[in-house]
Image (cartoon, coloured by chain):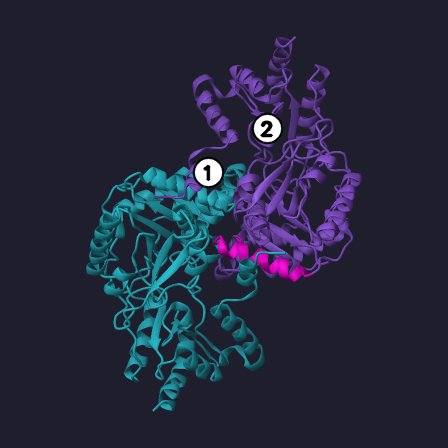
Chain colours: A purple, B cyan
Amino acid sequence: MINEKAYKLGSQRSAIRELFEYGKTRMAAVGKENVYDFSLGNPSIPAPEAVKEAFLDIVANDAPLAVHGYTSAQGDEATRRAIAENLEKRTGRKISPQALYITCGAAAALTSCIGALTISSDTEFIAIAPFFPEYRCFAEIGGGKLKVVPADEENFQINFEALEQSINQNTQAIIINSPNNPSGTVYTEETIKKLAELLTKKSEEYQKPIFIISDEPYRELVYNGQAVPFVMNYYKNTLVCYSYSKSLSMPGERIGYVLVNEDMDDWKMVYDAVAGAARSFGYVCAPSLVQRVIARCADVMPDLTTYKENRDLLYDTLTSWGYFCAKPDGAFYLFVRAPEGDGAAFSERAKKKDILIVGGAGFGCPAFVRLSYCVDTDMIKRALPLFKELMEETK
Amino acid sequence: MINEKAYKLGSQRSAIRELFEYGKTRMAAVGKENVYDFSLGNPSIPAPEAVKEAFLDIVANDAPLAVHGYTSAQGDEATRRAIAENLEKRTGRKISPQALYITCGAAAALTSCIGALTISSDTEFIAIAPFFPEYRCFAEIGGGKLKVVPADEENFQINFEALEQSINQNTQAIIINSPNNPSGTVYTEETIKKLAELLTKKSEEYQKPIFIISDEPYRELVYNGQAVPFVMNYYKNTLVCYSYSKSLSMPGERIGYVLVNEDMDDWKMVYDAVAGAARSFGYVCAPSLVQRVIARCADVMPDLTTYKENRDLLYDTLTSWGYFCAKPDGAFYLFVRAPEGDGAAFSERAKKKDILIVGGAGFGCPAFVRLSYCVDTDMIKRALPLFKELMEETK
């Protein structure tokens, strides 16, 4: 009677959501201050003041038919121009507004790229563990498959040997995500260079381009001033998927983009296929008022003081007690190895102390747990003694 | 290298968009006032003042983390409650917030319903001509097919004989659209009753539900005070797809919903499948600020004075000169039979006089043209003498 896969996706909440909903029930039962919710990647710092001012000024003063009217499917031209100019300044390369396709957030950007690159049911996409669990259902959107390359669990760069073995004639793209959810790792320039070399070699071997889909919602969230290598500067067959959800703290507004590398052979054809996939999913245009806000705020950067403070507090304290995790340079997650080597068991033990942390199995690393530190710093402080207990219980 | 179907969809503009873009070029060449653009269904009356006030008040006074944060995938609860209450008042039936799934407009609502109901490549959806051309690519989203039932060209109700012949074991749903784009026709209660009877009979014959997907973006745009029959009151296996694009003049904001009839057997299962399809396309949630605006403006109705004036002026004048069209009771389109019996030829002749009207072939009625009258009344007045010439040329 109905599509079974859609039913399954709609009726089974993700493990993350499940935990979050459980947290709400517990808060009602034992008090908000006694539950330590590290489950969701929801920004905890409000949108910058410039964003608020832009919203108010546009609604108050611009013509409503223009503000709330359809934009072209690829997005308002002023918005694309503002983004292109910002990216040119920061990446040192030529970027045209014509290469940008504005989307309803990074998820829509990813499904549109994947839809564009899926040729048949043999088509394969590769994710590198740890990876964002929704990649799986996105990769299957056009009937293709997701392959997962096991994690480099020491420093969460790329296990190149395993990656090379995973690539075959049907590989259309590698999906990367740096800064990474859930590990917080930023791929080094060396990693990106090695990846570009490998894919160039494999593209030649199979006589077809193998693309990189670079999912970059955390691009602006890095803490040590280090540059996040701009993947297009290293590999021509790159599509960037971006979202303003995290950088401008507006995940609900659904605004982001696909950027197609103009150095790619037939880049316009790939761009058109992205547009066509978006059209077929019912994306008419990205929300118009928010597009205008981005046109004004493309240069606004987040204030990372709180996230950095949270990261340092959590990382320094947990590792001093013997917890292992690669130091996250970006995003707002800590990916910690469970002391007992079993993330699900550790998450259950933590739950008994009303600490909500997500087991790593869904991310492709079952020995780990993810802690989102986009939370109140005070909550971290109150939770820390409990993490000490959790470690001591295993000794 | 890429998905051919997506490339085709992305590289070939719709005939409507093509004409609109041509119009912009002509306006630059001969002056805006000398081009008569009836091509697009873009509201010409601004969003109601209440919408503007809601935007300003929410952004100025609500907490930004809540305003711009993720809502649950099915939509903010207050928004769903406000919509449910409005619908209950108007339809006289019980409608729960739990049966509403907030979407990025009607297009997303349609693709989510179709995705939920597509079982295999044999799955068939039926559209009734004249129909919105995008139905075709939406119907194919999960690999299914679109069948088109020829129009009842006298009054644009339903040709039931042709519809009955189109239904078979693989028919999952009939997509209806009343008030209709492009004909402006409102299906009568008699039509809806006959449709319900036919589908009940056929569902029994094939031992499976055949659904109605009722696409209702023009529900609030009716001109003679007549009620638009609420399809759920006549047929239980109904899914409503709605958009605030036309009623609140904000097509760019992408906000609408799916409403699943709770009287349906296993309605929750169908609802979950809609949610799952939306999730797989990358719809995380509908834009959050606009959801809050709808929570406050669910009862706001459009002021139809201008559209009605335009309709009466165009309809009365054109028919007085011998043009044939069924009198449109709703939406903002006039669907006129080309005097030469060939919509494409008529559209071409009109174009030579800088009148832009869309040929009916894409809507499934090649003998007709569509005129969108969501335009300046003055432009209609200036164009009318040219329509007279166009008629006289054929005599």
Q: Marks 2 and 1, Cα distance to the nearest angstrom?
A: 28 Å
Q: Which residues are magenta?
A: A266-286
Assess disc 1: are there few (<14), some (14-19) or many (≥20) residues with their C-alpha within 10 Å of its C-alpha.
many
Q: Secondary structure at mark 1?
A: helix
Assess disc 2: are there few (<14), some (14-19) or many (≥20) residues with their C-alpha within 10 Å of its C-alpha.
many
Q: Secondary structure at mark 2?
A: loop
- Decide which of B255, B119 is in the foreground and name it: B119
Where does residue A224 sit, x and y in percent of width and height? 76, 34
Magenta-span inclusion, residue A272: yes
Q: Which mark is residue B40?
A: none
Q: Quadrant for residue B222, please give it.
A: bottom left
Q: Quadrant for residue B136, please give it.
A: bottom left
Q: Quadrant of the N terminus of chain A?
A: top left
Which residue lies under the disc numbered 2? A375
| Amino acid beneath label 1 | Leu
Which residue lies under the disc numbered 1? A9
**In this picture, is B202 found above or below A381?**
below
| Amino acid beneath label 2 | Val
Residue A82 visible in the snapshot: yes
- Decide which of A144, B91 is in the foreground and name it: A144
Going from the N terminus, do you reach mark 2 or mark 1 first?
A: 1
Q: Quadrant for residue B318, please give it.
A: bottom left
Q: Which residue is pictured at 20% across the width and 56% down the height?
A: B193
Count of labels shown? Answer: 2
